[in-house]
Amino acid sequence: MKKLILSIALLNLLSACAYFQPKKNVAKPDAEPAVSAPVPAAENAVVGNANAADVNAQDLAKADSAAQANTNDTNKTESNDAAALPKRSVYFPFDVDAIQDSDKVVIQAHGAYLSEHPETSARTEGNADERGSSEYNLALGQRRANNTKKALVLSGAKASQIEAISYGEEKPQATGHDEESWAQNRRADISYK
């Protein structure tokens, strides 16, 4: 029985590591350089210098627009991180404990924040909806909290900064007995101490 539980835990760990990929910075390729027609040798003295000046001006314009594009990309990334940081919950489908693609931005923003503030500590609180037994929901909430912690660590936080606990079905956000309420209760909250 212990081997079976250990094997399942190991498979969950491996699948979580394979599922969550850290954000990679990918540089955009520069625009194609402009190709100018060759200048005949007889006009080389006067027109050749003018073409060189035009090419230099074109190169400068391209470099300037590329720099502006890189600045815009950086601002968009910082803006996305700033927009994601106030969100403190990640949500899960029914009976699932893997972080969803839609919540990876939130996880990455909090992981980056924790890596930049090593004195800060946080707690991931796993929750489940009311369906299922109390024991099952506590275990599911713990898996959700653990996977959220692992994702934060993969995003730059230290494991020692984060505590993972489960509330199971004991702390619902919504008290209804319908899918909309249950969807709000299937979550892991990130709280700072």
Image (spheres, helix red, strand yellow):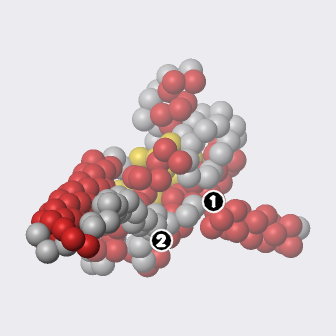
- SS under mark 1: helix
How far is disc 1 from disc 2 in space, using C-alphas?
A: 14 Å
* Viewer-nearest residue: 113 or 144: 113
Q: Position of residue 149 (x, y in %)?
A: 50, 64
151 displayed left or right of 139: left
N-terminal label among 1 and 2: 1
Whether residue 190 is visible to the viewer of this picture, yes or no, is: yes
Q: Which residue is mark 2?
A: 153
Q: Position of residue 150 (x, y in %)?
A: 53, 67
Check the image and report above or below for 156 versus 105: below
| Residue drawn at 51 percent across, 59 percent down | 148
* Viewer-nearest residue: 3 or 158: 158
Which amino acid type is shown beneath numbered disc 1?
Answer: Tyr
Which amino acid type is shown beneath numbered disc 2?
Answer: Val
The quadrant of the picture occupied by the C terminus is: bottom left
Q: Quadrant of residue 93?
A: top right
Residue projecting furthest to the front: 42
| Residue drawn at 52 percent across, 52 percent down | 126
* Viewer-nearest residue: 112 or 26: 26
The quadrant of the picture occupied by the N terminus is: bottom right
Q: Which residue is mark 1?
A: 19
| Residue drawn at 68 percent across, 42 percent down | 95
